Image: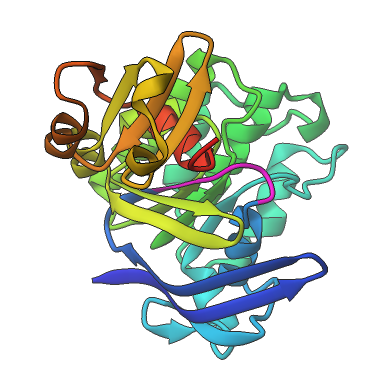
Amino acid sequence: MEAVVFKDVKKQFDGFELNIPKLSIKKGYITGFIGENGSGKTTTIKLMLDMLIPDTGEVLIDGMRVSENAKAIKEKIGYVGEPTGYPQESKLKNIKRMVKPFYKDWDEELFNSYMERFGLKEDKKYGDLSTGQKKQFALIVALAHKPELIILDEPTAGLDPVVRSEMIDLLMEHMQNEEVTIFYSTHITSDLEKAGDYLVYIRNGRIEMQAPKDELLNNYCIVKGPKHLFDKEIQKELLGYKQTSLGGEALVRSRALAKELFGNEVKYVVPTIEDVMVLLSSKRGE
């Protein structure tokens, strides 16, 4: 089943158009949303949150049109992004008191257990928290009302590896205890190596790839070799290609196809998510 569906969605701005004929986010999984700056990630999220209205098409969450069921849908969503909008001078207990009435399924016991886990005190002012603690608190608030869909927009940006790991661990444990879907937009692809189930890659407002993470990483192949091997005809078969100081580097749809194209003249490498994103971002033929 799908938690989120985009159908023939277009959104036009000056000099930019988001165009998503179809996008399905599987229920009960973590979907990583990747792409360079300006590719349309934030616009896509704003359409899901009813912060923007599509020019054409529709967005459905849990089978309901966002445009017609905004209030009911927002009760199902937990969101962590920047800025949080929380007042710097407010104590955490007052922020909780402000947010809690909007959610009928708020779980005070769950909130307290996560606060204790991260060592956060309700009497602390939000503005006195470190960057990592602010992100931790935002995540706790997002999880405490037991949302069915969690939307994360760069939730671990600027955080040290220890804090990032703690937040990812909490998300994964939360998923084991709750029926929840996570839509995770990030530049930090190592987070998705650890936690992602599906990947969606967006470029210039278009979805260029969506696939199970393991299938993609197991099937895709990176080849590295001398520049002369990557002629114009070969480049037509590549998903992405870039020149390096040592030669050429390309992303190929499968190892079998790579073997057919290059034989034993290149080095074969299993890609990471970052490799896939960088090479898909590289224009073919450059």
Q: Is residue 150 left or right of residue 260?
A: right
Colouring scheme, one of rainbow, by chain, secondary structure, one colour:
rainbow
Left or right: where 175 falls relative to 185: left
The residue located at (19%, 43%) in the rendering is 215
The picture places residue 183, in percent across and down from the top left corner, at 44, 53
Q: Is residue 217 above or below residue 50?
A: above
Query: Magenta segment: does it hold 91?
Result: no
The N terminus is located in which quarter?
bottom left
In the rendered image, residue 254, in percent from the top left (x then y), is placed at 19, 39
Residue sitting at the far top: 246
Q: Pick the residue in front: 201 or 198.
A: 201
Q: Residue sitting at 51 percent across and 16 percent down?
A: 244
Specify whether 236 is left or right of 83: left
In this view, 254 is above or below 242: below
The image quadrant where one finds the C terminus is top right
Question: Residue 68 or 137: which is nearer the viewer?
Answer: 68
Q: Is residue 92 above or below residue 124?
A: below
Q: Position of residue 15 (x, y in %)?
A: 79, 65
Q: Quadrant of residue 180?
A: bottom left
For this rendering, which residue is in front, 20 or 251?
Answer: 251
Q: How many marks?
A: 0
Does residue 261 appear in the picture of this structure?
A: yes
Name of the residue lying farthest toward the right? 89
Q: Residue at x 25, y 17 (%)?
A: 266
User: Is residue 61 depicted above or below 211 in this figure?
Assistant: below
Q: Is residue 113 visible?
A: no
Residue at image position (70%, 25%) is 131
The segment highlighted magenta reads 32-38
Residue 42 screen position, x and y as percent: 64, 55
